[in-house]
Image (cartoon, rainbow, N blue to C red):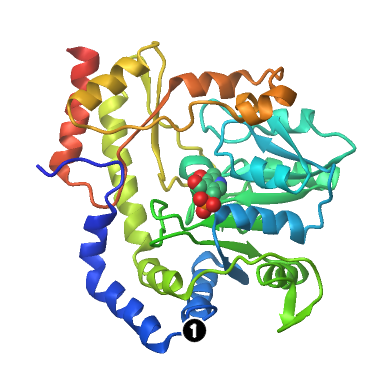
Amino acid sequence: MKSIQMVDLATQYHRLKADIDAAMNEVIVRSQFIQGDAVREFEQGLSKKLEVPFVWGCGNGTDALQMAFMALDLNPGDEVIVPSFNYIAAAEAAALMGLHPVFVDVDEHTFCIDPVSAEHAITTKTKAIVAVHLFGQCAPMEQLMNLCKKHQLFLIEDTAQAIGAQYLFSDGRTMYAGTMGDVGTLSFFPSKNLGCYGDGGAVLTRNEGLAERLKMIRNHGQKVKYTHEIIGINSRLDTLQAAILGVKLNHLDSFTRARQDLAKAYSEAFSKISGLIPPVISAQSTHVFHQYTLRCTAGNRQALADFLKLKGIPCMIYYPIALHLQPVFAAVHGNLSLPISSQLCDEVISLPMHTEMTADQQEYIIHTVQEFFHG
Ligand SMILES: Cc1ncc(COP(=O)(O)O)c(C=O)c1O
């Protein structure tokens, strides 16, 4: 059996090699490395796929969040609500702009932002909520949209981990993650569900005015070359990366199905183990399983991680420290009580999850976890 990895990018490349190589070669031959045709083609493909009118590629998912804050005209001192059980990007981009990240708790089942905790944190300075679709399923968008409407706040969707997930509204409508709020953001970091071969990201919106600002912001605030109307940044999606993404976009549905099938097999096997809670799928969202993250509730997570390592199985802790307790934020936010975020940081463990996993690899992982708990 081939050695097991958290994510197997090399095997995926070999499977798609002919198309990827041809797409990259075409970019090199044409030598339009910045804002070449492949960028626009990929943006159009993604716009169609996610049923959202405006999609602009950018440098990475962190820039995408910063661009969203800039386009929404947030100013130093404005407060932005973010979940504490999360990757640092949204809080970091906010802090970088002089905004104040305000950390709130998450739901213990879905790991996504808790709208009740978010509402408690709203002050007269609050300008926006960042809904993070963590690990691959949608945050409770209907409640968050109502909350934002009630308090006149912007809603930003960090969709770095959930491309293609669909949210089900109470009236039966469904929409794709990233297309429901004011601005959605994506990351195409190599290990993401749709990943390129370096850094990449995108912003999504339905609002024409915001779309125009976002497009200018990613390219030094200009619409017409050398006429700079607003302050922007340099955050463009490389043409080479767009060409790779264009090929991989055609496979996104099958990538997602492969992840969902693996998750189903994992959860069927683990649901009978006491002390281990498989990921809960919200009734309002599909789950695209960027991560397969279990809760290890009997205090033996480290022992499980050590056992897996001994058996040649990698695992990861996403995330070991809640954001309000991170050294960079703890001086100001460390006294907050966000019990679910803190508890999850002590309990979660993520297993290998990628499109190339073989049946015998997954059987071995399942068998090894069962062996740890049952001997
Ligand atoms: C939830 C979330 N938001 C934002 C980002 C930032 O994306 P990037 O690494 O492309 O800047 C990531 C990346 O891991 C992420 O997981």
Residue 121 shown left or right of residue 49 in the figure: right
Helix, strand or loop at mark 1:
helix
Which of the 4 quarters of the picture holds residue 19?
bottom left
- Residue at horizontal 73 percent and vertical 77 percent from the top: 222
- x and y, in percent, of residue 281 in the image: 45, 37
Q: Is residue 38 above or below residue 308?
A: below
Which of the 4 quarters of the picture holds residue 336?
top right
Q: Is residue 362 visible?
A: yes
Which of the 4 quarters of the picture holds residue 311?
top left
Circle 1 sits on which residue?
37
Residue 252 vs residue 141, the one in the foreground: 252
- x and y, in percent, of residue 207 in the image: 73, 67
Residue 160 shown left or right of residue 330 in the figure: left
Q: What amino acid type should be assigned to the residue bearing mark 1?
A: Asp
Looking at the rendered image, the quarter that the N terminus falls into is top left
Residue 80 shown left or right of residue 219 in the figure: right
- Residue at horizontal 41 percent and vertical 74 percent from the top: 243
- Residue at horizontal 61 percent and vertical 26 percent from the top: 327
Q: Is residue 241 above or below residue 338?
A: below
In the picture as drawn, the residue positioned furthest to the left comes out as 1
- Residue at horizontal 33 percent and vertical 56 percent from the top: 255
Looking at the rendered image, the quarter that the C terminus falls into is top left
Residue 171 vs residue 284, the one in the foreground: 284
- x and y, in percent, of residue 303 in the image: 30, 15
- x and y, in percent, of residue 322 in the image: 57, 27
